[in-house]
Image (cartoon, rainbow, N blue to C red):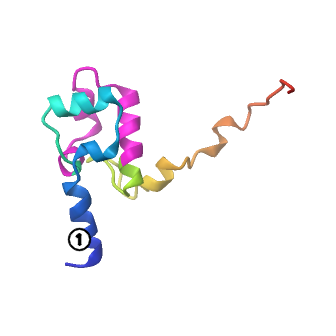
Amino acid sequence: PSPTDAALAADLALPIEELELTVRSYNCLKREGVHSVGELLSRSEADLLDIRNFGAKSIDEVKAKLAGLGLGLKDSPPGFDPTAAAFGADDDADAGFVETEQY
């Protein structure tokens, strides 16, 4: 296998503890029987939202952690760039914000 394949296999075998998720997200995934990154990748966003106490914030957290590994959930769109999602491709979100308080 190529070095890339070996790195991917290592990422897939990584226990979800290594993602350093919040306690809520971690406990929800463990309760659902998700123990490795590979098992997490086999789930879609809708699958994860079906987990009790696992909401949009948890989804965002998981997506960001996976993006840090260059990975995405099962239903990530084709051509999805996980690094752009993790590092704020939408930097214009605060463009209209003007800080008026002086220090």
Q: Quadrant of the N terminus?
A: bottom left
For image coordinates 34% across by 48% down, the residue present is 76
Can I make out residue 75 in this image? Answer: no
Q: Residue 93, image x and y in percent? A: 63, 37
Q: Is residue 46 left or right of residue 61?
A: left
Quick check: is 56 in the magenta stretch?
yes
Q: Quadrant of residue 90 in the image? A: top right
The C terminus is located in which quarter? top right
Does residue 47 lie above or below 15 as drawn?
above
Q: Label 1: which residue?
A: 6
Left or right: residue 84 versus residue 43 is right
Q: Which residues are magenta?
A: 38-65
Q: Is residue 26 above or below residue 67?
A: above
Question: Which x, y percent locates residue 91?
Answer: 63, 45
Image coordinates of residue 42 in percent, x first then y, are 19, 47
Crowd around label 1: few <14 · some 14–19 · many ≥20 (10 Å): few
The chief SS type of the magenta part is helix
Q: Position of residue 68 (x, y in %)?
A: 41, 53
Along the horizontal axis of the image, is 77 left or right of 27? right
The residue positioned farthest toward the left in the image shown: 33
Q: Secondary structure at mark 1?
A: helix
Q: Mark 1: which amino acid?
A: Ala
- Residue under the point 50% across and 53% down: 84
Q: Residue furthest bottom?
A: 2
The answer to whether any part of residue 40 appears in the image is: yes
Residue at the right extreme, as displayed: 102
